[in-house]
Image (cartoon, rainbow, N blue to C red):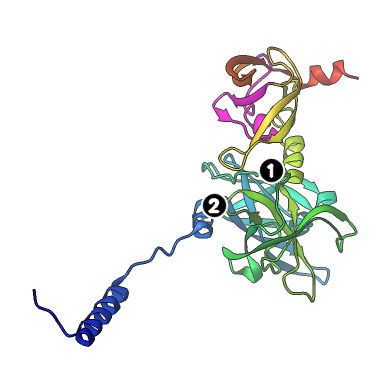
Amino acid sequence: MVKLPFRVGLVVAVLLFASVEAHAQYRRGNAITEAVAKTRMGVITLKVTKDSAYGGKKTIAGAGFVVDERGYVVTNHHVIVDASRIVVTLGDKSEVEATIHKELAKFDLAILKLDTKKKLTALKLAPAADLMQGETVIAIGNPHGYAGTVSTGIISALGRDIDMPSGAKLTGLIQHSASINPGNSGGPLLNINGELIGVNVALREGAQGISFAINADTVKAVLSKHLSAVKVSKVSHGLDCSEKVVGEEGDRQQVIVKTAAGEMKEGDVILTVGTRSLTNRFDLERSLWGHKAGDIVEATVLRAGKKTTVSITLTSAETRTASTR
């Protein structure tokens, strides 16, 4: 073995280390890049044409997100109010026309239906009950027409109330520090796992890093009511359910039966209905779209710690309404 003088050996070691560093490969991806990548196909941009008060037309930019693979999306009401035409750009860059399914000015939300037969990718709706002040958030939108813009920040505060220019008072908002601008309205606010925790709605004018989002629980309540099995398919399941946050990983939320019907019992945790897994009340409603009165749908529930298969017999929504008058 050849022995080198100490100083020569030190120089050789430094040069070898520098060579290794120059060719080292580091992992550039992280939780944020992964969240953006897996939600990309569920985020949309909007080009909304409105009649100008001075004659002619004006076009504004907005954003939104897919809530069901059959073509339902959500955005802000102020983005689409008085629209004469709405063109949506999907995650694959294709453009489709949209019609307004429901306007909810009180919550500054709107549900749109896209004119497409493509199977879309819906974002996962997270619970808002376990949001943490200081946790990382990701905003994706269409600021000033720059589609797919990503910004990050933290939750600054919870339970904020603001007055909108329309006169509506929005409550229970998430205040966060991710940068948003005109065109971000209606776009998703995600957590580090790529779950939707809010809908970006406003920024504090003249301030840096003060942005607001409608929380996901408000979104789920609106969807459960206005895209219910009763509204979409005129059938009723007869159940009243609540949601419970049960953990930090995986499916963090469960659907619990409050008012039983048929073979369901109070306290059952509904795991699946038909082919759809349930993590919120809206999942229950959309699992029954396309069915008709008299259909029997199988469901899996967790009862006393054991999985059990039960049946849901659907009834006519008109019959149920008449019986409760």
Residue 210 in picture, x, y percent from top left: 75, 68
Q: Quadrant of the C terminus?
A: top right
Residue highlighted by disc 1: 127
Evaluate if marks 1 and 2 touch, with contact meaning CB atoms under 8 Å apart. Answer: no
Q: Is residue 91 visible?
A: no
Tell me the number on the disc at residue 39: 2
Residue drawn at the location 70% of the way across and 66% of the way down? 177
Q: Marks 1 and 2: which is nearer the front?
A: 1
- Taking the image as shown, residue 53 lies to the left or right of residue 176, namely right
Residue 122 in picture, x, y percent from top left: 58, 44
The answer to whether residue 86 is magenta is no
Relative to the observer, which residue lies in front, 292 or 276?
276
For label 1, the SS is loop
Residue 250 in picture, x, y percent from top left: 56, 39
Residue drawn at the location 64% of the way across and 26% of the way down? 288
Residue 226 occupies quadrant: top right
Give, as a single range, the part of the protein colored magenta: 268-295
Residue 318 in picture, x, y percent from top left: 79, 21
Q: CA distance from mark 1 to mark 2?
A: 17 Å
Q: Is residue 204 visible?
A: yes
**Vertical order, 120 against 308 (above or below):** below
Residue placed furthest toward the left? 1
